[in-house]
Amino acid sequence: MSQSDHITARGFQHNRSSFVDGYVSSASSMMSVTQAANRDEGCQDALDHLVRALLAKRIFEPFVILDELRERDLSLDTIVDLFIPRAACALGQEWKDDEISFADVTIGAMRLQALLDETMAQVDLDAALIDDRPQSLVVLPKGQQHFLGVNVIAAQLRRLGCGVSLSFDESMGYLNARLKDEHPQLILISCARRETLETVCETVQTIRATLSDSPVIALGGGVLDEAENLKDRTGVDIVTRSVKDALAFYAHHDQALTGL
């Protein structure tokens, strides 16, 4: 299916609530550099323009949309950290309100991913690399589907100077092999809903059993709005919505280990 295809048949109606809740929460409350949305008229107009482009029946050209957003004086950071998640929320809400089809949401998410890729292609990641930043792994456990939000997290980490790899819906065996090969120092797990917390716990246990050098494990995502005592329940080191907070925790942890 091309990105210009527009399917009007509605699907997955019986899973509408659970899918949208996970989709919206993962986009709006994942670990984010930018916490507060700028709600002035210019920003809302730019967001509306982006959402219209995501839903348009014509071919979507991410470089054109990026140029149009940049002409509105939006920085690359703002587009990644604020506008892409907010646009994802807008799509999810419109589907929940039965204003657009499931296919519209799916194609819109694909288009947002293309916009994210185009935006990151213009970021000088070599200049962003910082020697003392950790090698990081972003994990989307099995049974979860918010790939766009996880890619936003990865983009934020790269812009903050970290090396980053991704684990999408991998079995524990594959994750175990990845951990042994990559030895990440900071691991960020995303969880959208409380129903998948058992998998998060299993993921944390696999990490602890595989790596003996005590990587920092952070948990974020929409589950933060649905459950309490997540640190104790899952065994992670920090529960946060902020990539910067996770990095600060890692830095403090690393200093404690080295005695600095």
Image: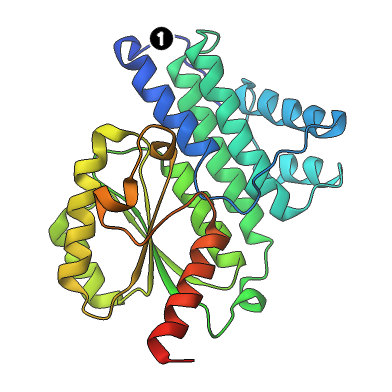
In percent of the image, x 64 and y 24: which residue is there? Answer: 58
Q: Is residue 130 left or right of residue 258?
A: right
Assign the N terminus to one quadrant of the image. top left
The residue lying furthest to the bottom in this view is: 259
Q: Is residue 141 left or right of residue 159?
A: left
Q: What kind of colouring is applied to the model shown? A: rainbow
Q: Nearer the viewer, residue 1 or 203?
A: 203
Asked if residue 188 is positioned above or below residue 193 in the image, the reply reads below
Q: Nearer the viewer, residue 182 or 251?
A: 251
Tag 1 residue: 10
Please give the count of numbered marks on the rendered protein.
1
Asked if residue 134 is positioned above or below residue 206 in the image, the reply reads below
In percent of the image, x 40 and y 39: which residue is there? Answer: 146
In percent of the image, x 53 and y 43: which residue is there? Answer: 113
Q: Which amino acid is tagged 1?
A: Arg
Residue 187, horizontal then vertical, whole percent? 37, 64
Residue 77, horizontal then vertical, whole percent? 70, 54
Residue 1 at least partly seen: no
In percent of the image, x 22 and y 75: which residue is there? Answer: 211
Asked if residue 260 is positioned above or below residue 89 in the image, the reply reads below
Q: Tag 1: Cα neighbours inside 10 Å, few (<14), some, or many (≥20)?
A: few
Residue 208 at least partly seen: yes
Q: Nearer the viewer, residue 105 or 175?
A: 175
Q: Nearer the viewer, residue 75 or 53?
A: 75
Residue 237, horizontal then vertical, whole percent? 35, 62
Element at label 1: loop
Residue 177, horizontal then vertical, whole percent? 18, 69
Q: Quadrant of residue 22?
A: top left
